[in-house]
Image (cartoon, helix red, strand yellow):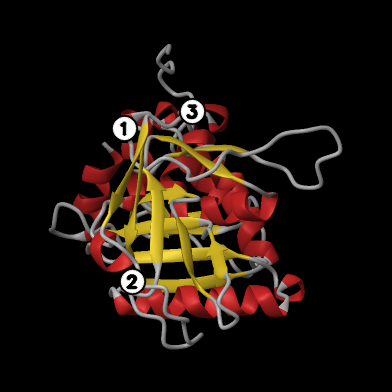
Amino acid sequence: MSRSSPGTPPPCCLRSSRLVGAVPEARVNVNEASAEDVELEYVSAAGLRERGSLGILWSVPFESVRPERRFPAFRGQGNWCGWYWSATCGRHVGYESWLERDHLMLLDFDPLVTGMSSQPFRLSWAGTDGKRVRHTPDFFVRRADGTALVVDVRPDERIGPGDAVKFAVTAAACRSVGWDFARVGTPEVVLMANVRWLAGYRHPRVHRPGVAERLVEVFVDGAGLLDGARGAGDQIAVLPVLFHLLWRRVLTTDLETGLLSADTQVRLGLVQEGGGDAVASATAASG
C-alpha cells in the first residue's frame, strides 16, 4: 500500500479489528445512558479498528483518529462532501455537507480549540425495542484545557423523532464520561460570512512578520480597516496579512453585526500567550 503524500487526506483503510471489553445488551433509557451501556467503534491513526465500551475507551485521543466511515462521492449526490484544511490541526478534516464545513471553520477559528476530527467514532446501544441503534457524531473536539466536545450538525427542521432519540442518548453518554455535547444548526449569517472570508487567509504562508509588526503598531489604539492597512504599507501587500491576523485573533473586530468593510474598526486582540501588556503579547504572536 502506498503512503499518502503530505497534505492529502488519509485513506480510511483498515488493518485489523480488535475488541476491547464488552457491552451488556440491556436496553438503554434515552436520558440515562451510561458509558457502560454504549459501545464505541473507531479507527485509530494507525488504521486499526477498535471496538469496546465507551467507559473503557473514553480516554482515547479521538481528535487524532481517522474518520470512522468514508466520505462518499457519486453522480446525483444530494450533499457535498469534502476535506477542509484546518489551521488548528495542520491537516485536512472531512465534512459531509456545506453546513458541516461551516462549523469546521468556526471550530478552526475558535482559539480554545486545539484539535478536532470528523466522524470520529460510531456509538451503538440497545434501543427500547431491543434492536441495536447506531449513531456516528459529526465531530470530536479537544479544547486547550483538555476537555472534550462532541458535535452533531443538524438544522432544527431536519430533526425527526429518531434523530432526537439518538442525540439525547449521545448527550447522556457524553455526560457520563465528562464530555460536553452540542447539536448545532445553521450559524448566524453575518458571522459565518465574515469567518468564511477570513478562512481564506488562515494558512501560515500568508504571514509576513515585518508587515504583521507594523499592523500591530497601527492598530494599537484602534483604526478603520483600510486606513490601518494603508498606514502599514502597500494595501495590496498588507491586507492579506491583516486578514490573517484577524483569523489568528492577534487583531480583532466585531464580526457579528456587519460584514467586513473598509470602515470596519479593528483593534488589538486579547492575545493570551507570552504574558505582559497587550502590545507586547500581540507583537510576540504576530512574529
Mark 2: few/some/many CA within 10 Å (<14, 14-19, 20+): some
State how far apart marks 1 and 3 are (Cα): 11 Å
> Residue 104, relative to residue 156: is it above or below?
above
> Residue 19, relative to residue 165: is it above or below?
above
Q: As drawn, is 2 to the left or to the right of 179?
A: right
Q: Is residue 276 visible to the viewer in this orientation of the structure?
A: yes
Could you say where residue 10 lies in the image, as x and y percent from the top left? 45, 28
State how far apart marks 2 and 1 are (Cα): 24 Å
- Give the number of the mark in front: 3 or 2: 3
Mark 3: few/some/many CA within 10 Å (<14, 14-19, 20+): few
Total numbered badges shown on the rendered structure:
3
Quadrant where the N terminus sits is: top left
The residue shown at (39%, 31%) is 204
Helix, strand or loop at disc 3?
loop
The residue shown at (41%, 57%) is 140
Given the image, on which type of amino acid does mark 3 rest? Pro
Helix, strand or loop at disc 2?
loop
Q: As drawn, is 286 to the left or to the right of 134?
A: left
**Of the residues under marks 2 and 1, which one precedes in the sequence?**
1
Q: Which mark is residue 179?
A: 2
State how far apart marks 3 and 2 are (Cα): 28 Å
Could you say where residue 17 lies in the image, as x and y percent from the top left? 36, 40
Residue of label 1: 46
- Circles 1 and 3, Cβ within 8 Å, touching? The answer is no
Helix, strand or loop at disc 1?
loop
Q: Which mark is residue 11?
A: 3
Mark 1: few/some/many CA within 10 Å (<14, 14-19, 20+): few
